[in-house]
């Protein structure tokens, strides 16, 4: 069931989103060669808790960390590790949620570790821009398929593929709510978009094929062909005047 938010609830979600966005900004600033993914996770947890919030991901379904940190061919749900030191040229996707005053903020970004290849930068650029294509399509009266179609068209026109096994989602009092928000689809199909809806749009884009597999730890999801993947996400609210991004640091 899709839950429409009141103006008060949207204000609370914006506060949660700001905490999540600021934590993500801090995490991105920490991405440097030689830094461990565990160090970044600790930074994220400390910041979120200092704001009086709770890391949305910590313990969620048994996830053992506060941030998903996914490097290179890891698509999503990478588990931070003390022994995983970032290297020059890595691309690092960081997904963070913060739970504050009854609501979640959820966002992700892919950061360059030092100088990255032209191919890696192009993938990140295309994925980031596809997120904003999807947000622009999230207009009241449109449908979920319009969002997915906008992302898919942008990505595939540049020779990349969108992951099919994982999708965006509604977000609010629960981290994952209805509706599902695929990064592919048919315009004019799916749930109608209404003011008061809050959704997380999150393109996961692969340099190669769209198929992925989950490793034995039950979380880490990688591209099956070993090629790079990028991930960008914002939580947004639909208003009568169009989409508003909830996960902004300022």
Image: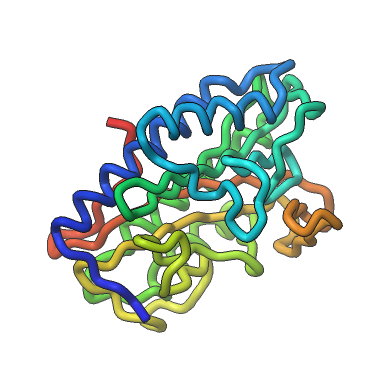
Q: Is residue 233 above or below residue 112?
A: below
Q: Which is nearer the eye, 89 or 220?
A: 220
Q: Quadrant of the N terminus?
A: bottom left
Is 179 on the left-hand or right-hand side of 64? left
Is 55 on the left-hand or right-hand side of 104? right
Observer able to see residue 151: yes
Residue 190 place in picture, x, y as percent: 40, 82
Residue at the image position 59 percent from the left and 28 percent from the top: 42
Residue 123 place in picture, x, y as percent: 61, 42
Q: Which is nearer the eye, 42 or 171?
A: 42
Residue 155, by quadrant, is: bottom right
Residue at the image position 34 percent from the left and 77 percent from the top: 2
Observer able to see residue 123: no
Residue 89 place in picture, x, y as percent: 72, 25
Residue 86 place in picture, x, y as percent: 73, 24
Q: Is residue 159 above or below residue 83?
A: below
Q: Is residue 224 above or below residue 129?
A: below
Q: Quadrant of the C terminus?
A: top left
Residue 43, by quadrant, is: top right
Residue at the image position 72 percent from the left and 24 percent from the top: 36
């Amino acid at each position: 069931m899709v839950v429409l938010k009141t103006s008060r609830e949207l204000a609370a979600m914006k506060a949660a989103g700001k905490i999540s966005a600021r934590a993500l900004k801090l995490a991105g600033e920490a991405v440097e060669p030689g830094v461990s993914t565990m160090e970044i996770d600790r930074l994220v947890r400390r910041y979120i808790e200092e704001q009086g919030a709770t890391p949305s991901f910590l313990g969620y379904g048994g996830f053992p960390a506060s941030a998903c940190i996914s490097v290179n061919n890891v698509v999503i749900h990478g588990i931070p590790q003390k022994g995983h030191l970032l290297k020059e040229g890595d691309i690092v996707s960081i997904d963070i949620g913060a739970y504050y005053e009854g609501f979640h903020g959820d966002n992700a970004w892919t950061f360059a570790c030092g100088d990255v290849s032209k191919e890696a930068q192009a993938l990140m650029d295309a994925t980031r821009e596809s997120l904003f294509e999807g947000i622009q399509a999230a207009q009241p009266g449109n449908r979920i398929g319009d969002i997915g179609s906008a992302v898919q068209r942008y990505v595939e026109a540049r020779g990349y593929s969108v992951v099919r096994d994982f999708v965006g989602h509604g977000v609010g009092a629960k981290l994952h709510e209805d509706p599902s928000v695929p990064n592919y689809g048919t315009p004019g199909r799916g749930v109608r978009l209404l003011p008061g809806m809050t959704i997380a749009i999150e393109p996961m884009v692969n340099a190669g094929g769209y198929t992925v597999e989950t490793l034995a730890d039950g979380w880490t999801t990688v591209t099956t062909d070993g090629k790079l993947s990028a991930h960008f996400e914002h939580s947004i609210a639909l208003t009568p005047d169009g989409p508003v991004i909830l996960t902004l640091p300022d």
